[in-house]
Image: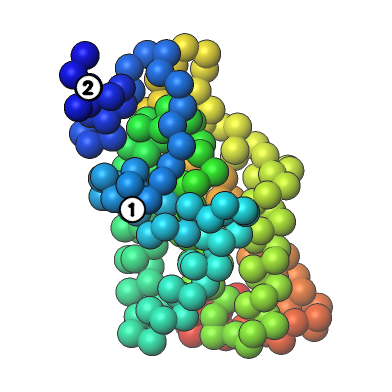
Amino acid sequence: MNPAHPPGDLAVSAGEPPPPGRPPRRASARFMLSHPAHLVSLGLGSGLAPFAPGTVGTLWAWLAFLVLDVWLDAAAWAVVIVLGIAVGTWACTVTARALAIEDPSCIVWDEVVGFWIVLWLVMPAGFITQLVAFGLFRVFDAVKKGPVGWADARFKRRRGQAIGWAQGFGILFDDGVAALCTLLVMAVLMHAGVLPPAATLGGRGL
């Protein structure tokens, strides 16, 4: 074995599965910068937060949305989200393989795309409405009950199965379902008058 290339380094750089039986790795800034897929899947570093990386990643998604929304309209956001799912499936697969963990907590691109879906349909909205959307999304994603729990288990690998594209997509899938559950509750709250109504669908709202 070449000491310059400890186990897993080639998998990290090439996006290939790690050697069988290799123990899981820990994500770090050096790991994140070693491959573009890691930079994406770790949410430009938000996934390296020592506590609640999913919440930090969602906060990063919120901030990024507010910044990008200055230039992007509804149609452009639709393209960004579709591309985010496609690129995210690749990035999450590569990173999960490199870490030898099926669904690492440091991967937060799923939270990013999931919350972008929520904001895409809720905005324009006031801060309180955005905050409620944030809280609901985090609860659905963290608790993983009902439809979200089903989605989370849908693409889990079988014993002895290597981490593949199905698992990479599965990382994103349950957050997509969490986004749909959030939007459903938001729509109920808006129609009940608890929250101010969002714009019409033509204006990108519920």
Q: Give above or below for 203 relative to 160.
A: below
Q: Nearer the viewer, residue 161 or 4?
A: 4
Foreground mark, 2 or 1?
2
Label for residue 71? none
Q: Is residue 139 visible?
A: yes
Give the residue displayed 52% in from the left and 13% down from the top. 159
The image position of residue 182, as x and y in percent, is: 66, 62
Give the mark, 2 or 1, whose residue is nearer the N terminus: 2
Residue ID for mark 1: 39
Q: Give the position of the N terminus as an image quadrant.
A: top left
Label for residue 3? 2
The image position of residue 119, as x and y in percent, is: 53, 72
Give the residue displayed 70% in from the left and 66% down from the top. 135
Q: Give the position of the C terminus as an image quadrant.
A: bottom right
For the image, the number of numbered tags is 2
CA neighbours of label 1 inside 10 A, class few (<14), some (14 to 19), many (20+): many
Looking at numbered disc 2 in the image, what kind of residue is underneath it? Pro
